[in-house]
Amino acid sequence: MDEKLLLGQVLTFMDDPFARGWQAASRHSTRSGIVLRDGRIAATGEADALRRAHPRAQVTDYGEALILPGFVDAHMHYPQTGIIASWGKRLIDWLNSYTFPEEMRFGEASYARTQADLTLDLALAHGTTTLASFCTIHSESVTAFFEAAEARGMGVVAGKTCMDRNAPEGLRDTPRSAFDDSKALIETWHGRGRAAYAITPRFSPTSTPDQLAALGALWAEHPDCLMQTHLSEQTDEIAWVRGLFPQARDYLETYERHGLLGERGLYGHAIHLEPREIDRLAEVGAAVVHCPTSNTFIGSGLFDMAGMKARGIPVGLATDTGGGSSFSMLRTMAAAYEIGQLRGTPLHPAQLLWLATEGSARALHMGGQIGTLAPGAHADLCVLDLASTPAIAQRSDRAEDIWEALFPTIMMGDDRAVRDVWVSGASRRG
Ligand code: GUN
Ligand code: ZN
C-alpha cells in the first residue's frame, strides 16, 4: 500500500471559530502526523503512534513547520494575472483600461494555456490548492484552465465569463451563445475528475436581462453547478445597475429576477448591501466572498464580516487577482484583519485561517472534501515555516501559543513561508 506520513505541527478545526469561539473550535498539536493514501487523508494523530501504526509509510518530517489544509481562494480571475498591480483606477475604469484589453487575448488558446499554467504555479507556490476562477468569454480560456488544473491534480472551479453589453467588441457574446457555450463546457468539464463548473455572468452591468435569464435557465437545468458573479462592490457600480435595471429594487434583485439567486450562488465583494439583500442572501443560504486586498486596492469599501457571520451567511475568502494585489492567501488574511480593525471587529488568527481554508471550502460547497484535514478529504496541504524571514522569526520566537506563533506569518508572510504544498497526495515541491 502506498502510504505517506507527514510529521510536524498540526492545527485542525472541529467547528467554525466564528460560531463556537476559537478555543473550542480548534485543536493544536506540536508533534503530530497526517497519513496520506490514494490522494486522500487517511488519518491524523500523534506522530509516534502513527509511525507505529504505519511502519511502511514513506515519512517526511517537517520538524516545527505547521501542516495545514491547502488554502482555498474562492474568487479570482486567472486572465488578470498579467495585469495585477495596475495603477490608479476605480472599478469601471480599471476594467476598461486594463482588464478588458488583457482578456481579449484569451481567444488565442496558446496564450490562455500560458497564463493558466503561470497562475496555477503561482497559486501553488503560495500554498493555494483550490481556486474558483472567472475565465474570459472565450471557451478556450476555460478549457486551458481546467486542463492546467487537471495536469496538476488540482480541484478547481471555473466558468466562461459571459458579457453581452458594456464590453468592447471582441469581448461580447449573446444570450444564446452564452447559454450554448457554457452548456457545452458543463458537459465536458463539470464533475470530470476534480473539476467543478460555475455558471459565470460577470456582473449585471455587462449582461442584458435576456442574457441573465438565459444563464438562469441554464442553472435551473444544471442545479448542481455553482454560479459565480459580482455584487455591490462599488457605489458607482450600484448606481449604474440602478439605471440599467429600473424595475429592480436593488442589485441582488437583478440576479434574483433572472433565476440567478440560489444556495449554490457565490457573490463576490458584497460590500454595500441593502437590508433586503442581506435578508435574501441569508434566507437562500447563498455565499458571499470577501476579497480584502482588492477592496483596498480598487478603493471599494469595508466588507462587514461580523454582520454577515451574525446573519449566518456563508463567507469565503479570496484574492480577486488581478483586482486583488496579491496571490497570497496569507496577505489576503492580513488584509481581512486590517479591514476588520477599520470596522472595529478584529478577527482572531483562528478565524482568518478558517476563512482561508474551511470557510472558503464551505462557500464552494466542498466542505469535507477540501480545506480540512479530516480523514476522507483530498490530500491538499500547505506546510508553513513560521520563521520564514528574520522579521517574522524574531516575533514568532517569543510566542506563547500557536496563534501568537502563526499571526506574524499571517501578517508578514508570503510565498517564502510555504515550505511545501501537496495536491491530491503528491508534493508539488518535490
Ligand atoms: N466586477 C466585474 N468584473 C470585475 C472584475 O474583473 N474584477 C473586480 N474586482 N470586479 C469586477
Ligand atoms: Zn472578481
Image (spheres, rainbow, N blue to C red):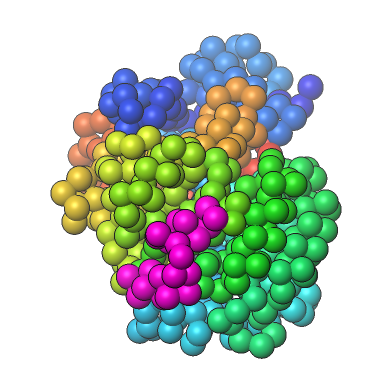
Which residue is the extreme one toward the front? 247
Q: Residue at x 31, y 49 (%)?
A: 275
Q: Residue at x 47, y 56 (%)?
A: 253
Q: Is residue 90 visible?
A: yes
Quarter residue 396 falls in: top left
92 vs 124, nearest the viewer: 92
* 37 over 79 or under it: above or below: above
Main SS of residues in magenta: helix
254 vs 361, nearest the viewer: 254
List x then y, in percent, for residue 145.
71, 61
Query: Relative to 114, is 395 on the left or the right?
Result: left
List x then y, in percent, for residue 66.
43, 36
* 17 over 151 or under it: above or below: above
Give the magenta part as a residue range: 235-257
* 52 over 377 or under it: above or below: above
295 vs 167, nearest the viewer: 167
205 vs 384, nearest the viewer: 205
**Which image quarter holds the N terminus?**
top right
Q: Residue at x 44, y 79 (%)?
A: 92
Q: Is residue 128 visible?
A: no
